[in-house]
Image (cartoon, rainbow, N blue to C red):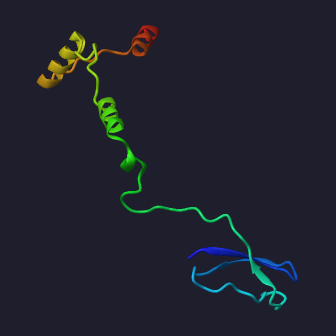
Amino acid sequence: MPTYDYRCEACGHALELFQNISAAPKRKCPKCKKSKLKRQIGGGAGFLFKGSGFYLTDYRSDSYKKAAEADAKPAPAADSAPKASEKAAEKASEKGEAKLTPSPSKEKAKKRSK
């Protein structure tokens, strides 16, 4: 049901009424009680589409969908092969051997304490 704007020609009172489309326009002003109420011409209301079939992607062309699929696929990168140090770390973690290397800040702290 739409909202209609009304204005009284007698007192100038403005109001909005939520009415059915098939309802007759109101004539009596709620403020001055005179029958000078006129429905204003409005700019209309915005539409809110809900449900399936109203999404922007539902109306895309086939060429757009194919390009989007091509962009979504990961391109093979030149650096995709793991480096030797990464391979060694993976093998050590698989065997349960973990190589722990002290961080530079810990080494400096040890040197200072000596």
Tag count: 0
- Locate the N terminus by quadrant: bottom right
- Apparent side of residue 37 relative to residue 82 in the rendered image (left or right): right
Q: Residue at x 67, y 75 (%)?
A: 4
104 vs 8: above or below? above
Q: Residue at x 41, y 56 (%)?
A: 54
Which of the pair 73/39 is nearer the observer? 39
Which of the pair 103/43 is nearer the observer? 43
In which quadrant of the rendered view does residue 88 lie?
A: top left
34 vs 74: above or below? below
- Apparent side of residue 59 relative to residue 78 in the rendered image (left or right): right
In which quadrant of the rendered view does residue 43 lie?
A: bottom right
Residue farthest toward the left in the current orientation of the protein: 95
Spot occupied by residue 101 in the image (x, y as percentages of width and height): 30, 15
Q: Residue at x 30, y 35 (%)?
A: 66
Spot occupied by residue 47 in the image (x, y as percentages of width and height): 53, 62
Q: Residue at x 73, y 73 (%)?
A: 40
Spot occupied by residue 104 in the image (x, y as percentages of width and height): 40, 12
114 vs 62: above or below? above
- Apparent side of residue 99 relative to residue 7 in the rendered image (left or right): left
Spot occupied by residue 15 in the image (x, y as percentages of width and height): 75, 77
Residue farthest toward the right in the current orientation of the protein: 11
- Locate the C terminus by quadrant: top left
In which quadrant of the rendered view does residue 89 lie?
A: top left
- Apparent side of residue 77 relative to residue 25 in the rendered image (left or right): left
